Image: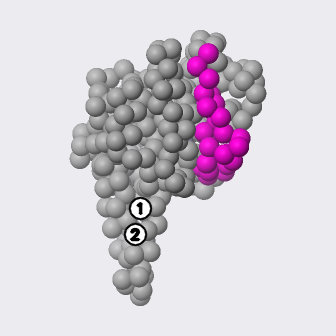
């Protein structure tokens, strides 16, 4: 199938949230595609700025595009948490069908202005745009937000922001954070409900790793339409490598190392997709 945009995925008849998984290499993308194809569900392949730095934009874009072309389910190729306007332009040129401008570190007016500019160029190219309002805590790649710097999305600001920017979907900060949770994640579901009631665009929840199943089901029921997962995939990837090498310390063929790794990540992908279906 050809790549589709995030808007096309949202417009399709799919109940629940569509999972977005970050990928950094061939193994991650194979696991994501295999999981989505086994369940026959659409999926969002995401790349962070750190992923671009690690793999190179052309390599990583090619991986995503080939996965979509060969794939049996609809796929959007999404640039995740991008703070760099120039990289967004390059990603659009490289074939990404969706981009996230993360200007949440800037004051409200500047976030709005930069997001509006991204929407202008992305929409001209037929590409969907996600933005972030409020600040999601934790660490994702090169973006680290200390607990004291994180703040929740304000509903009134969100209405003003979405109306002015014409962004396609919004990442909201309602408590969950990136990375591995220390202690019980504390979600403000009342705020999420309020945001859902005042905004008529799809809402995105970041930091989807490690949330209790019941909480995930609740946020999907409230109306989250894009559910982002990275940390649990990364943990499955690296834990499996550790376990295989412990079992077989003299192993040297990387294929024997990565085959069980892909299987472990595929299991995470499938469990998240099943959990976020309505
Ligand atoms: Zn995120």
Do tag 1 and tag 2 residues touch (Cβ < 8 Å)?
yes
Can residue 246 be seen here? Answer: yes
SS of the residue at dot 2?
A: helix
At horizontal 40% and vertical 69% (from top left) the residue drawn is 240
Image quarter of the N terminus: top left
Q: Residue furthest bottom?
A: 250
Left or right: where 147 falls relative to 185: right
Seen in the picture, residue 25 relative to 124 is either above or below; the reply is below
According to the image, label 2 marks what residue? 240
**Viewer-side residue, 157 vs 16:** 157
Can residue 165 be seen here? Answer: no
According to the image, label 1 marks what residue? 236
Seen in the picture, residue 278 relative to 208 is either above or below; the reply is above
* Residue 176 image offset from top left, x and y in percent: 52, 41
* Residue 118 image offset from top left, x and y in percent: 64, 24
Span of residues in magenta = 132-156
SS of the residue at dot 1?
A: helix
The 10 Å Cα crowd at callout 2, few under 14, some 14 to 19, many 20 or more, is many
């Amino acid at each position: 199938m050809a790549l589709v945009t995030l808007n096309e995925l949202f417009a399709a008849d799919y109940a629940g949230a569509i999972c977005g998984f970050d990928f950094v290499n061939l193994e991650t993308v194979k696991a994501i595609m295999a999981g989505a194809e086994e369940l026959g569900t659409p999926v969002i392949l995401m790349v962070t700025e750190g992923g671009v730095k690690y793999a190179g934009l052309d390599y990583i874009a090619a991986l995503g595009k080939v996965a979509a072309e060969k794939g049996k389910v609809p796929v959007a190729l999404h640039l995740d948490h991008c703070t760099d306007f120039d990289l967004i332009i390059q990603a659009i040129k490289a074939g990404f069908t969706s981009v996230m401008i993360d200007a949440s570190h800037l004051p409200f007016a500047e976030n709005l202005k930069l997001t509006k500019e991204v929407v202008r160029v992305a929409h001209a190219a037929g590409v969907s745009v996600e933005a972030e309002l409020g600040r999601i805590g934790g660490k994702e790649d090169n973006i680290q937000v200390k607990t004291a710097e994180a703040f929740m999305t304000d509903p009134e600001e969100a209405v003003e922001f979405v109306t002015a920017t014409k962004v396609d979907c919004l990442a909201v900060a309602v408590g969950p954070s990136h990375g591995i949770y220390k202690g019980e994640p504390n979600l403000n579901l009342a705020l999420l409900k309020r945001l859902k009631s005042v905004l008529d665009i799809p809402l995105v929840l970041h930091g989807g790793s490690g949330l209790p199943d019941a909480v995930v089901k609740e946020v999907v029921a409230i109306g989250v339409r894009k559910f982002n997962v990275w940390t649990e995939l990364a943990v499955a990837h690296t834990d499996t490598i550790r376990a295989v090498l412990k079992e077989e310390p003299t192993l040297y063929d990387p294929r024997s190392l990565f085959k069980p790794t892909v299987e472990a990540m595929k299991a995470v992908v499938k469990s998240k997709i099943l959990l976020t279906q309505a």
